[in-house]
Image (cartoon, grey):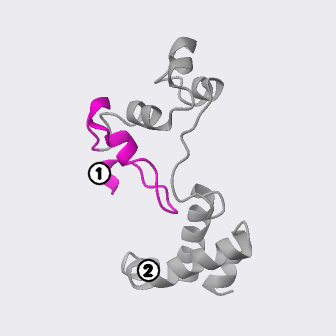
Amino acid sequence: MGISEAIHSVASSTIVGDVATEAWEENADEIKRLGVNNDRRCAMLIGQCAHESAKFLARSENLNYSADALFRVFRKYFPTRAECDAFARQPEKIANRVYASRMGNGNTASGDGWKYRGRGYLQLTGRSNY
């Protein structure tokens, strides 16, 4: 199975698969330079990208959480229902809190959490990963 067929086998649609295949082809030299140079490694990278990006649909992390979802997913950062209610459906504020002061990001006021939220097919997150 070739790269295009492998990507299309896990993509959410033909059009999305075409876009992901094009991105792979545009970056083929860099992908090989990074050691993705055999069928197994290609399959692993394609699988990881498909998983992280919702089958190649998401190119930017969706942080538009409801209060209930914040409490479930990010309880460490939103330990009370009142905090969850105050941040619900405010993706920028959520990112700035949950990604503050880690992964090379500044504090909540720096805006780094939002600026360096998960992006790309691998959903790289944090200043130090960009």
What amino acid is found at the position of numbered circle 1 in the picture?
Answer: Ser
Q: Earlier in the sequence, mark 1 or mark 2?
A: 2
Around disc 1, counting alpha carbons within 10 Å, would you say few (fewer than 14), some (14 to 19), or many (20 or more)? few
Q: Residue drawn at (73%, 76%), measured in percent from left and top?
A: 14
The magenta stretch is 104-130
Q: Quadrant of the C terminus?
A: bottom left
Judge left or right: residue 129 versus residue 48. left
Which mark, by number, is residue 128? 1
Q: Which residue is labeled 2 in the image?
A: 27
Q: Which type of secondary structure does the marked residue at label 2 adopt? A: loop
Q: Which type of secondary structure does the marked residue at label 1 adopt? A: helix
Which SS type dominates the magenta stretch? Answer: loop
What amino acid is found at the position of numbered circle 2 in the picture?
Answer: Asn
Q: Real-space Cα distance between discs 1 and 2?
A: 21 Å
Judge left or right: residue 36 versus residue 40. left
User: Is 125 inside the magenta-drawn segment?
Assistant: yes
Q: Residue drawn at (38%, 79%), measured in percent from left and top?
A: 30
- Measured as percent of width and height from the top left, residue 50 is found at 62, 63
User: Is 68 inside the magenta-drawn segment?
Assistant: no
- Measured as percent of width and height from the top left, residue 64 is found at 57, 38
